[in-house]
Amino acid sequence: MSTSLPNSGNLKPTISTRQLTMIGIGGVIGAGLFVGSGKAISSAGPGIVLVYLMTGLVVILVMRMLAELATASPETGSFSSYASRELGSWAGLSVGWVYAYHWCVTVAFESIAGAALAEQLLPGPPTWLYALIFMSALTAVNLAAVSSFARFEFWFAMIKVTAIVVFIGIGIAAIAGLFGGHPAPGTTNLLGHGGLFPRGYSAILTAALTVFFSYFGTEMVTVAAGEARDPVRAVRASMRSVAGRILIFYVGSILVIVTLLPWDATEVTASPYTAVLTRLGIPGAQAIMNLIVLTAVLSCLNSGLYSSSRMLYSLAGRGEAPRVLRRTNRAGVPVAGVLAASSAGFLAVVANYFLPTGAVFNFLLSSSGSIAVVVYLCICATQIRAHHNRTPEQTAVLPVRMWGAPYLSYAVGLVLTAIIVGMAFTAGTRSPLALTLTVTGIAIAAGAVHRPRTATPLPVAADQPRDTPHCSPTDSAT
């Protein structure tokens, strides 16, 4: 029997469990894996595998915390709604707006990245025209119906997953010396070019920022749960498998790359996946990878429009954003939210018309690079507060529980805080961190002085007693 979403407003619960599961799987494989991994490898050397592994472990634990919150009370606002309930309206407002801002920037970033890839595949038209086509097409998809978004994202995810699995399979064969007469590389590329961390351990933080950016999107399945037919089951299944997905798709593919190729090779920095396939003699490797990366970019653009619009919808429902963002059409689509989310992408198109592609690309990437850490820290704080607010009986019946709570939750919070502090003392991450903290500070200040005029009552989980104490969205922080 499906579990419906209470107080879901005018959104339509039409996303199937199969679609939501694939969205969760595909959400892990973002464009950052294909585009940003080369930069991460060149920053840290072969030891980047350990960076992906350790950073992935932190993300796995954060997602476990979010799964506990989301399966107990699946909502479109996800962690923003939970932060409002557990920490106060200021927290939900600030993290919700920061998250929406991040995805708006990501939409702009991906539109430029996709245009650059399309220009390589079909040279001739200017990049701004490709960006305009992509933005217009996927904005129309998101405006049509949530089922349109889900169908597109399902097939985008299918292509990404298939590509990564095939790549890892080819890589394993090559490492074993079983591919086309290429000798097994052994540990030559892992240890023979300056060791695991040839640039020193300070490079780890710079690489970690890129890696965190790559992992961001894993949480999207909890945002989409608000429009799922059976949100509890789908979220539980998706979030429980996040560890395996990170280990296979990220750690596995990066290990293949640094084992088969020297970390400091120019072609690795430019496009590591293409470099591996080219070295192994795969015909048309560059065109194949450009098509796959373009798919990942369009998937991320599609997801960004969806995630940002639904977060704005949730904020408006709690009186923490303009009411117009709450309005939906007959198909249950928050039209104003989708248009607001897409506006950043269309502004990027205009900027790309007047400025070089690289200038726009690099600025957008830097301006949102460490927001993932801030959002994860908020999820951690929310879960800790929720854990303390529950009785042992309520905790015992949760569909998903955080391991070792609250002690492991505290440990994750300390690690995330240490990463932020470390970024402040590392030259390569200081500027992105300053931009992120500026945006976050503005959001927190707005949340501290804002008092919602109206608020939609927050849903109560089916397995949660009605007398459970909660902070209402209008409560201030305690």
Image (cartoon, helix red, strand yellow):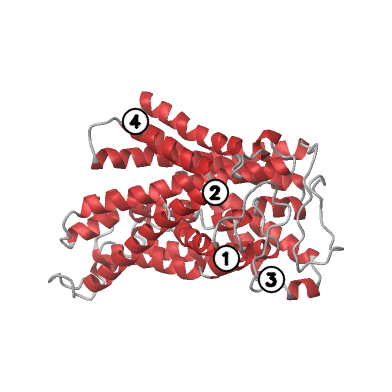
Q: Are marks 2 and 1 in contact (CB under 8 Å)?
A: no
N-terminal label among 4 and 3? 4
Q: Residues within 10 Å of mark 4 (few under 14, many from 20)?
A: some
* Dot 3 amino acid type: Ala
Q: Is residue 38 above or below residue 312?
A: below
**Quarter of the rendering containing residue 466:** bottom right
* Dot 2 amino acid type: Val
Determine the residue located farthest toward the top in the rendered image.
Answer: 354
Disc sitting over residue 405 in the figure:
3
* Dot 1 amino acid type: Ala
Disc sitting over residue 393 in the figure:
none
Q: Are marks 2 and 3 in contact (CB under 8 Å)?
A: no
**What element does badge 1 sit on?**
helix
Image spot of residue 369 (x, y percent): 49, 45
**What element does badge 3 sit on?**
loop
N-terminal label among 4 and 1? 4
Q: Residues within 10 Å of mark 1 (few under 14, many from 20)?
A: many
Residue plotted at (40% across, 54% down): 156
